[in-house]
Image (cartoon, rainbow, N blue to C red):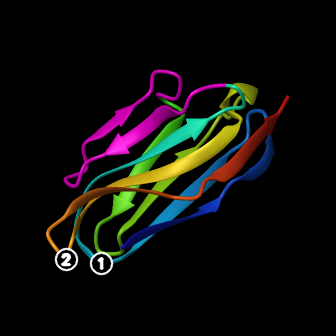
Amino acid sequence: QVQLVESGGGLVQAGGSLSLSCAASGTIFSINTMGWYRQAPGKQRELVALISSNGNTNYADSVKGRFTISRDNAKNTVSLQMNSLKPEDTAVYYCNANVWTTNWVSTWAWGQGTQVTVSS
């Protein structure tokens, strides 16, 4: 079993910054892609940013230039630095990882979500 635990988030004024972190644990052999998604009230979950095991990144157009995703492969963690936050960034943010388990099973794991609220 694989667990993802997020930390960070909270309430910030527009223009401010927040940092999210996510730690993976369990029967992990290796982790391929890690990423962050978000879901605002009444909207579908959407991709925010992805990072491959070799560090290649991909961002949603709405966050390019403001958010930075990074990972520590030794610690099985992924982080999201969010700058110049806007009210429309308000959402529950979810960590996601594609994991090869020690039983040679490929699985997608999700965190429980952390709330980010940006006030205007």
For disc 2, the neighbor class at 10 Å (few under 14, some 14 to 19, many from 20) is few
**Distance in Å between CA atoms under marks 1 and 2:** 5 Å
In the rendered image, residue 120, in percent from the top left (x then y), is placed at: 85, 28
**Residue drawn at x 52%, y 58% as measured from the top left:** 111
Label 1: element kind: loop
Q: Is residue 74 left or right of residue 20?
A: left
Label 2: element kind: loop
Q: Nearer the N terminus, badge 1 or badge 2? A: 1
Q: Is residue 31 magenta?
A: no
Decide which of 118, 30 is in the foreground and name it: 30
Q: Is residue 111 left or right of residue 9?
A: left
Q: Relative to residue 46, is residue 83 depicted above or below?
A: below
Which quadrant: the N terminus?
bottom left
Residue reaching furthest top? 61
Residue reaching furthest left? 104
In the rendered image, residue 80, in percent from the top left (x then y), is placed at: 51, 50
Q: Relative to residue 38, is residue 87 depicted above or below?
A: above
* Disc 2: which residue: 102
Q: Relative to residue 1, is residue 68 depicted above or below?
A: above
**Cβ–Cβ under 8 Å for marks 1 and 2:** yes
Q: Is residue 80 left or right of residue 29?
A: right
Asked which quadrant contains residue 27, the reply is: bottom left
**Residue drawn at x 61%, y 35% as measured from the top left:** 39
Q: Amino acid at mark 2?
A: Thr
Q: Amino acid at mark 1?
A: Thr
In the rendered image, residue 11, in percent from the top left (x then y), is placed at: 80, 48
* Disc 1: which residue: 27
Decide which of 65, 102 is in the foreground and name it: 102
Q: Which range is magenta? A: 43-64
**How many numbered circles does the render carry?**
2
Q: Is residue 55 magenta?
A: yes
Q: Relative to residue 94, is residue 109 depicted above or below?
A: below
